Image (spheres, rainbow, N blue to C red):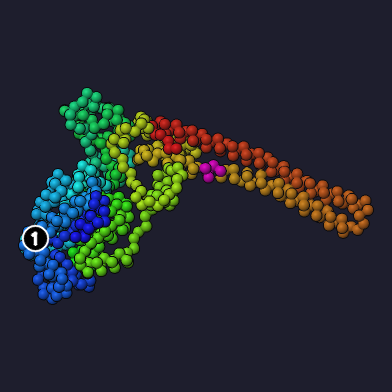
Amino acid sequence: MVMTSLAEKEGLKGRVQTIYIDPPYGIKFSSNWQVSTRKRDVKDSRTEDVTRQPEQVRAFRDTWKLGIHSYLAYLRDRLIVARDLLTDTGSIFVQIGEENVHLVRAILDEVFGSENCCSLITFVKTSVFSTELLSRSYDYLLWYAKDKEQVKYRRLWQKRYERTEGGTFNWIEDDDGNCRRLTASELRGEIETPKGRRFRADTVVGQGATATGSKPVVFKGHNYLPSPNSHWKTTWDGMNTLVIVNRITNVGKVLAYRRYENDFPFMPFTNVWDDTIVGTFSEKIYVVQTGMRVLERCLLMTTDPGDLVLDPTCGSGTTAFVAEEWGRRWITIDTSRVALALTRTRLMGARYPYYYLADSPEGVQKEAEITGKVPPPYKTEGDIRKGFIYKRVPHITLKSIANNPDIREGMSREEIDQAIAVCDTFDNPITRPLKNGLVAYQKDPSRTEGALREAMLDEVPGLESYIGWLGIIAGVAPLMGLFGTVVGILNAFIELAAGGAVTDPNSFALLADGIYKALITTAAGLFVGIPALVVYEYFRMKIIDLMRDMDRVAVSLLNALGITMED
């Protein structure tokens, strides 16, 4: 009745983006309500619980009068109204247990059409031990769209983890650039894994031969062809680019792409969620409460900030709680006084993390810090529909490297080793930064420029230390001369005052002698300070010229390595 009222009287038909329904899993007493806010232990057919809410007992008896047929009819009626409430891009999630999942799916196929089934999601609910056959620890989410062709979907990511023994990143590249496959003992952790970058040897060929995509590629002096009836995954020029940046290795007689662990340390979620368990020690306030992670993923997958979410089976209010946290509008419905009391208390006492709105001065500033790009000035309005500021992670792909126009062919490994040896032979402020950059290039080409600049800055204090004392002398010597002049003149006036009459010829001679000595002190200070200043400025300009030479040599090295400098 309430859902129909929302559609017809409140004008919400076609306005709801996502609906989450957690109906009773069946027709047992404990599947339908909780009798008290302080008591979650609800057992089937326990008479002391029956008397707590007699109106619900009567509703329970009338609703399930025909057993499973009543249950399916009850669900079908609500799904039909839910379909009318959804937008054309909307989704509906129905949470159900294994007892009736096949029946509920048939009803959803009837109402929404089997072609609009998006996925059957399996998630862990709790760790349960059963003495009868296998324990049941999973529940299911039936995800349907109003129109699968138009459904709103936002891909979610999780930190990458290995699901196979030993992992798939079973190759190692040491600091010298040598590669080998890890042994079984190293993968199992029985012996220590050597230091280096782990990577996976991925295929670089696709099915079907092409005229331009099947040309031979030269790697380490040998020609390699794709296997029969296949072609390179990128263009022939792209393959040569991968060779230049050391992204290709040979596995026997075939080439493979080096996919490093940190190229993209995340992976997409599948339809099996095994980290959603609601354990004994978690904050569970309702007998059939769903874990927050389940609701969170459903909403983040199918809605944007500002979208409307509906939960006609409120329970503990988890849907409303999660929707509020992530900036979604929400409506939740329940006939149980216990459920509504728990939800009201939960929402009124909720505390949420702080997120930057994209359409806010703080959000604009944070986005500029993350991206390094300052957007043109505009008036922010705090519109939540423009979303939040999200964390970024690197995502390096074969395609992004192969099609990068800034990558050019650089020095070979043998030439780099020779250049390092020359730098060791002629150790000076120019060769030391060059060596640092070359060594960094061998380990990770992307860090070459940063390592080179850092080493150049480290040389500046050493160079300036040679002329530091000259600068001090040039600055202090004139001041010492001036100090001597002032002291000499003061002494002359003191002696003049002690001599008596000012008209005495001897007094003038005494005054002249004092001034003469004072000026001698000034001249001595200038005699020392001026040459020191000239020498200081000469060597300071030499240091500036040397730093310019270092910068030019650094640019030449980066060009020789085929690296485009950052702005």
Residue type at numbered disc 1: Ser
Q: Position of residue 516 (x, y in %)?
A: 82, 47
Q: Quadrant of the N terminus?
A: bottom left
Q: Which residues are magenta?
A: 460-464
**Identity of the residue drawn at 80% across and 48% down:** 517
Q: Nearer the viewer, residue 344 or 289?
A: 344
Q: Nearer the viewer, residue 52 or 233?
A: 52
Q: Nearer the viewer, residue 430 or 246?
A: 246
**Identity of the residue drawn at 44% across and 51% down:** 361
Prevailing secondary structure of the magenta residues: helix
Q: Nearer the viewer, residue 355 or 45?
A: 45
On whether residue 309 falls in the magenta region, the answer is no
Relative to 325, 37 lies left or right = left
Identify the secondary structure beneath mark 1: helix
Q: Residues within 10 Å of mark 1 (few under 14, many from 20)?
A: some
Q: Circle 1 sits on which residue? A: 70
Note whether residue 531 is visible.
yes
Relative to 308, 369 lies left or right = right
Task: Give the quadrant of residue 310.
Answer: bottom left
Residue at the extreme top of the image, as rendered: 211
Task: Give the quadrant of residue 98.
Answer: bottom left
**Identity of the residue drawn at 62% across and 37% down:** 538
Q: Position of residue 126 (x, y in %)?
A: 17, 61
Residue at the extreme front of the image, as rendered: 9
**Identity of the residue drawn at 91% across and 55% down:** 502
Q: Position of residue 273 (x, y in %)?
A: 20, 53
**How many numbered markers are drawn?**
1
Q: Quadrant of the C terminus?
A: top left
Note whether residue 186 is visible.
no
Q: Position of residue 444 (x, y in %)?
A: 35, 40
